[in-house]
Image: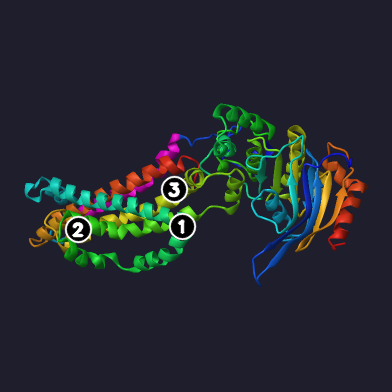
Amino acid sequence: MSQASTNPGISQEGSDVPTAPPPQNFVKKYSGPIAVQIACIALWQLISTTGGLPSYILPSPIETLATLADGSNDWFNNTMVTTVEIFGGFILAVIVGVAIALFFSWSTRLFTLFMPLLVALNMVPKVALGPIIIVWFSYGIFTNTLIAFAICFFPIVITTARGLREIEPELLYLSRTLKASKWQIFTKIQFPGSLPYLFSGMKVSAVLAVAGAIVGEFIGSERGLGYLMLQVQINLDTATMFMAVLMITLVGVILYGAVAFLEFILVKRGGQA
Amino acid sequence: MDAQIEPFISLQNVKKIYGSGTNQHLAVSDVTLDINAGELISIVGPSGCGKSTVLMILAGLISHEDGQVLIGNTDNPFDANRDIGMVFQQDLLLKWRTVIDNILLPAELLGLPVKESRERALDLINLVGLDGYEDKYPKQLSGGQRQRVSIARSLIHDPKLILMDEPFGALDALTREKMNLELLRIWEKSQKTILFVTHGISEAVLLGSRVAVLTAGPARMAANIPIELPYPRTLEMKTHEEFGKYCREIYDLLGMA
């Protein structure tokens, strides 16, 4: 196959081009960025201890971590509450978003009637709906889950609906000459083809879900990391606030990582871009 | 052409109108063409002349207004549900499927037995010259290789008729010539009836036992030229005087000479 020689991605018999990069490349690729991040934390420690700033303005990394030992912060329960809100809102958004996108893909009429509405609703700043949602459902975990849901639902439904419609007409012709059923076309061509779109929507939503849950807790709550931040703010306990932000970030990273991992398993490993 | 042979495909004064009411567009005005089983016929004409519409009518994907379309004869009964293979200009490979799984797609849609289909797919991978590539993904292949996979996919369910709509139109000139030779080889081995739509005149002459020339919209049969060059054909034939004569005749018919 002489054409193959123009494509460097293909290993050929008798070719001495290695198929996988040697392990040093891995270290080379990631050691730089990791060093930069460690340097930032070191710089933070340096400035906070020698910069003459009071610790209620800039607590040091060590002071921040030390707040973990303070039992009155109830880290475990507050983190669990926020985690439930974030993951709950996100999973609900995936389920409802994909279901609505499916209805859209089955009926062009539904799509043309309701897609403009969704795009318009997407323009509403969802954070502004928080107080209204609290009026409707009172405050608590369920309400904050709903706020997280409201903020991360739209990217999923819009990208997935687009992905389900991205099917080459010729591929439909080909399927029709084989008398493929709608269900076969959906399961074998349309749905797998829409997965990269679904995952790009999910990655945007994973970040938004965290913001939604925290905003909900700021507006009204009696538990959670956002609630904790408001409580310790009164005492100018900035170190605990820093730690709460770190915990919130950690929960967000775990959610994002789970989505990225699923994407790797289902999409990237299987040759899709 | 022996008049006693019952044609495999018979198109009689086929006409196609798109749209309705006052917004009508005549895409095909009058196409008459007989094709024997096992023939490779080229259909050539300018872009947008309705060549593809003729293929779509044969594939049963669109209806026609007038005339008659018959496919199949006593020796070769035709089952519209599974006797059509199609190859388009785009390879239409599914990115998430390997070469062999892409080739198996029609077999899956038709519910053919898995084990036999797999064996057949491996034979076809060999036929199109992609041995050892069965577990590669489309993005690991070159354009020519991808089109080979798409040809193998059109053969997996052993259809009697292969419809090709400018299959090599997106390839570079050298790859395209190579694929022409490959197609001739695949055609000889598989004994399929192939309709090859193209706007490349020398490609049409090189491949076809006959070239049907369609003139610009609405598509009308300008001529049906038997190409009396012996098979197996070679690229070297393109330099023959006879080959040039056929090309010139077609350029004349298309008003381009």
The amino acid beneath tag 1 is: Ser
Mark nearer the N terminus (2 vs 3): 2
Residue range highlighted in magenta = A23-50
Is residue A31 located in the magenta-colored stretch of the structure? yes
Is residue A241 located in the magenta-colored stretch of the structure? no
Residue that appears at 72% across and 37% down: B77
Q: Secondary structure at mark 3?
A: helix
Q: Which residue is mark 1?
A: A107
The amino acid beneath tag 2 is: Thr
Q: Is residue B155 left or right of residue A138?
A: right
Confirm whether circles 2 and 1 share one chain: yes
| Neighbourhood count class around disc 3 (C-alpha, 10 Å): few under 14, some 14–19, many 20 upward | some
Residue B112, disc? none
Q: Which residue is mark 3?
A: A195
Looking at the picture, tell me which residue is in the foreground, A121 or B56: B56
Q: Is residue B208 left or right of residue B148?
A: right
Mark nearer the N terminus (3 vs 1): 1
> Relative to A193, is A119 above or below?
below
Q: Which residue is mark 2?
A: A143
Q: Chain of mark 2?
A: A
| Neighbourhood count class around disc 2 (C-alpha, 10 Å): few under 14, some 14–19, many 20 upward | many
Confirm whether circles 3 and 1 share one chain: yes
The image quarter containing residue B17 is bottom right
Looking at the picture, tell me which residue is in the foreground, A266 or A103: A103
Give coordinates of residue A253: x percent, y percent. 29, 48
Label 3 near label 2: C-beta < 8 Å? no
* Image quadrant where one finds the N terminus of chain A: top right
